[in-house]
Amino acid sequence: MNEEQAKERILELREMLEKYNYEYHVLDKPSVPDAEYDQLMKELIELENNHPELHDEHSPTSRVGGAVLDFFEKVEHTVPMLSLGNAFNDQDLRDFDRRVRDGVGSNVTYVAELKIDGLAVSLTYQDGRFVRGATRGDGTIGEDITNNLKTIRSIPFKLKEDVMLEVRGEAFMPKKSFQKLNAHREEEGQELFANPRNAAAGSLRQLDPKIAASRNLDIFLYGVGKLEGHSVDSHDESLTYLSHLGFKTNPEWKKCANIEEVIEYVNSWQEKRPDLPYEIDGIVIKVNSLYQQEELGFTAKNPRWAIAYKFPAEEVVTKLEGIELNV
Ligand SMILES: CC(C)(C)c1nc(N2CCN(c3ncccn3)CC2)c2cc(C(N)=O)c(N)nc2n1
């Protein structure tokens, strides 16, 4: 094929592969068999190698990891990534609810979300294209890990709308991937990761993105930092909008009319937690109205409009060689 046809085919393959990638990794509903996806990817890699002048950092081929870095650049978060106050029992949640209602009156609804046990990250999009990804760091200064985050297949390179957006989420390693990774490390006589959170953090701190690409990481987005080109009035609307843009949001969130419904949700998920394919360490509860969030504001370091209910650490049965210790 000539130059013009090659260019056309490259652009066509990029569109197709991005769409198939979205169906598989965000919707979990692939429309083509893996073999067809792999065949198309192989064709695109070949065509791009023969046409370096058509290089595009947002091509689906750049998901497999690019150049090895010497270090990570520091990044300042335009909107600081806050931390969360904790609740440990129902009374703490009722106290939180009372403080909220003292602040904004009794007409308040909440959104409850699973608290994914991973690594908090922030993704920046300009004109709807992924331009940078960073760790939370200390909430103000994080590390630029764009190259590694690009290997997470559920992170869209191009959004459904050309908005300027800074979105927050939790990168994590699914339980099955964690077990496979540690089994492999055990065979190789390497040190094991203690838990999926450490494995995800360790993978995203690798200077070689090919390592991150091999770790089957995933992400759920849960909050908007900066947003230009669209406006929302409530948190549940933000989650719906993020999903509309093409982001993977956790499907288990629930709008609760009052704190009693929140307590029900918390107790139900404390039971169902072991059945999830990823680890959670609690539930995050947020005042739904963004206007009321503004009114409530922040303490020195936490929002007054959100709290994290922490589950007790899961019992661990340590099995040494033949000896069973119930800890
Ligand atoms: C936007 C707010 C501040 C309300 C917020 N903050 C969160 N976090 C803050 C503390 N973080 C943190 N991380 C490290 C050290 C200190 N704090 C880790 C993220 C949230 C984490 C999750 C999750 N994990 O699934 C979630 N569904 N919603 C969150 N929402």
Image (tube, grey):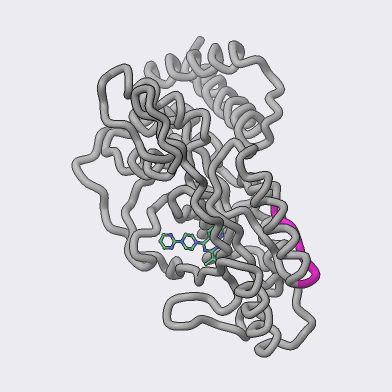
Residue 141 appears in the figure: yes
- Residue at the limit of the structure toward the left, as seen here: 70
Q: Position of residue 7 (x, y in %)?
A: 50, 23
Q: Is residue 297 magenta?
A: no
In-image side of 260 versus 115 (left or right): right
In-image side of 65 versus 303 (left or right): left
Q: Position of residue 173 (x, y in %)?
A: 48, 37
The residue under the point 33% across, 51% down is 144
The residue under the point 59% across, 71% down is 306
Taking depth in this image into account, of 113 and 135 the one nearest to the observer is 113
Q: Which residues are magenta?
A: 253-258
Q: Position of residue 64 (x, y in %)?
A: 41, 27
Q: Is residue 256 magenta?
A: yes
The answer to whether 179 is drawn above or below residue 266 in the figure is: above
The residue under the point 55% across, 82% down is 297
In-image side of 258 versus 295 (left or right): right
The answer to whether 116 is drawn above or below residue 294 in the figure is: above
Taking depth in this image into account, of 11 and 107 the one nearest to the observer is 107
In-image side of 186 versus 112 (left or right): left
The answer to whether 187 is drawn above or below residue 201 in the figure is: above
